[in-house]
Amino acid sequence: MSGPDQAPDSDAAELVPIVYEELRRLAHNYMRGERAGHTLQTTALVNEAYVRLAGLDAMRWRDRTHFFAMAATLMRRVLVDYARQRGRAKRGGGVSLTSPDEHAAAPESAVDIVALDEALGRLAAVDPQQARVVELRFFTGLSVEQAAEALDISPATVKRDWATAKLWLYNELKTDDDAG
């Protein structure tokens, strides 16, 4: 990667060591929302994401945002796969539905990462852009402006989609909780 926002000129295997600390930050954000005593550690999450990134030989990274969006998506998949393997119940020990800049605020109720992943799938069927905004803001930790740039939409649209998607997901997850 020749600059922070320029397209990289190397493949994932060469790029990951350069951005390892940023990947650790992303993983730390994920793990912060997990229950205390979670057996999957930050380093293991980064390493598993690296293995999956390295397996994407044909992937062409458009820019830094594209790379980190893919890394965050893969980390999300690792956590979902891990949660499914562990067979966690839907209640407790999940992630909080907040954005990175809201982590300092009062904690919100935790939801299971599997339930969140399934709800995001349903949201993507209804409004793919809102689902992508959630992925970029919540899972990748991009700012409103960075998400707007990545999606080629206005920051106002990102803010609106983010607010609408959070409400939609809250209602979906509450319905899932009530049904389960």
Image: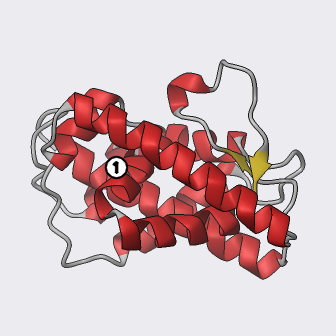
Left/right placement of residue 148 relative to residue 97 reads left
Q: Residues within 10 Å of mark 1 (few under 14, many from 20)?
A: many
Q: Residue at x 35, y 29 (%)?
A: 143
Left/right placement of residue 91 relative to residue 129 reads right
Res. 137 visible in picture = no
Q: Regarding mark 1 in the picture, which secondary structure is present there?
A: helix
Q: Position of residue 107 (x, y in %)?
A: 75, 29
Q: Residue at x 28, y 62 (%)?
A: 12
Q: Position of residue 111 (x, y in %)?
A: 74, 54
Q: Residue at x 55, y 45 (%)?
A: 167
Q: Residue at x 87, y 70 (%)?
A: 89
Place residue 4 in its image quadrant: top left
Q: Count the marks: how many? A: 1
Which of the image's four quarters has the C terminus? Answer: bottom right
Res. 131 visible in picture = yes
Q: Amino acid at mark 1?
A: Phe
Which of the image's four quarters has the N terminus? Answer: top left
Nearer the observer, 146 or 4: 146
Nearer the observer, 28 or 69: 69
Left/right placement of residue 102 relative to residue 144 reads right
Place residue 36 in its image quadrant: top right
Q: Name the residue tied to disc 1.
A: 68
Q: Tell me the colour scheme of the image.
A: secondary structure
Nearer the observer, 152 or 24: 152
Q: Position of residue 159 (x, y in %)?
A: 34, 32
Q: Position of residue 50 (x, y in %)?
A: 45, 63
